[in-house]
Amino acid sequence: MATTLSKLSKIAAAVLIAGVTLNAFAADLLDTVKTRGTLKVAMEGNYPPFNFKDPKSGELTGFEVDVAKLLAAKLGVKPEFTTTEWSGILAGLGAGKYDVILNQVGITEARQKAFDFSQPYTLSTAQLIVRKDEKRSFPTLESLKGYKLGLGQGTNFEQKAKAVAGIDVKTYPGSPEYLADLASGRIDAALNDRLLVGYLLKSSNLPLKAGATFGDIDKIGIPFQKGNPKFEAALNKALDEILKDGSFKQVSFKWFGFDVSKAPSAQ
């Protein structure tokens, strides 16, 4: 009898543990964030003006740092920032290393298969960068067939450029590398988000200029793990609130001089 009771006790304990484990997995991310008191936010930390280390203070700053602080405040928690390389940032989200990413992550069909997204908080489009003495016209992405185009590895622009047969796509770790190659003539043009082009041209001090804008409007959202409907609703509510109360617009004008939540044609 003692042996039987012992076995029953072990079975009961196993069932209890299994139940607790299932409940833990079933917990919505909003509950986790609220209990913890922090929203774990991942970003590169070297992507100015969106997120970067202030050269003087060494503190993390930028547009998306400010947005993360606004959202965390609306959720009633504090932001906890993690910086990581772009190449592994989505994998880290999938592994549960952080709750969300604010790093200009485009909402694409492929990414939506793996993650849920907030409503868009940034709208933009692609823009070329060319040398100041460039005489050739590149009004569309297709017009770059037969030419060398530089862009950041793993970005939406890489996928779009490689989808056009005939463009010689060169990928780089970041903008300093492809801007240097463009200025020296090793590539014919570079491609980036129009929000970044002005900043890059101003900060690079290279003989380059902005080229044509083209393509669809890119919608940028905040990805998080699937299966968290309460968190999704709370995050979108927080976004709605900062868009309506003017705090998002204030941050946007601080970094870009216009409201990045509006489509380019609406500026």
Image: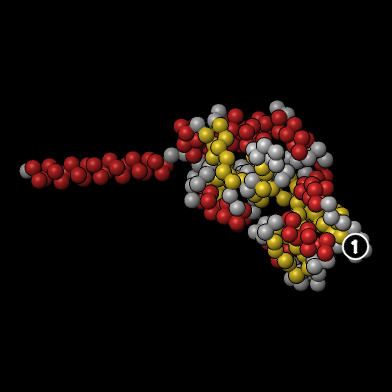
Indicate how the structure is coloured in the image.
Answer: secondary structure
Q: Residue at x 22, y 42 (%)?
A: 12
- Please state if 23 lies on the left or on the right of 99 as rendered: left
Decide which of 14, 172 is in the foreground and name it: 172
Q: Does residue 213 lie above or below 50 as drawn?
A: below
Give the secondary structure at mark 1.
loop
Q: Residue at x 78, y 40 (%)?
A: 256
List the single residue furthest toward the front: 56
Q: Residue at x 50, y 46 (%)?
A: 97
Residue bearing mark 1:
134
Residue 111 image offset from top left, x and y in percent? 59, 54
For residue 209, say whether it is visible: yes
- Please state if 137 lies on the left or on the right of 158 as rendered: right
Decide which of 170, 9 is in the foreground and name it: 170
Q: Residue at x 82, y 41 (%)?
A: 266
* Image quarter in which the N terminus is found: top left
- Please state if 34 lies on the left or on the right of 85 as rendered: left
Residue 47 image offset from top left, x and y in percent? 69, 48
* Image quarter in which the C terminus is found: top right
Q: Residues within 10 Å of mark 1 (few under 14, many from 20)?
A: few
Residue 187 image offset from top left, x and y in percent? 80, 66
Residue 131 sits in which quadrant?
bottom right
Residue 121 image offset from top left, x and y in percent? 68, 41
Which amino acid, by three-letter code, is at mark 1?
Glu
Q: Does residue 94 lie above or below 64 as drawn?
A: below
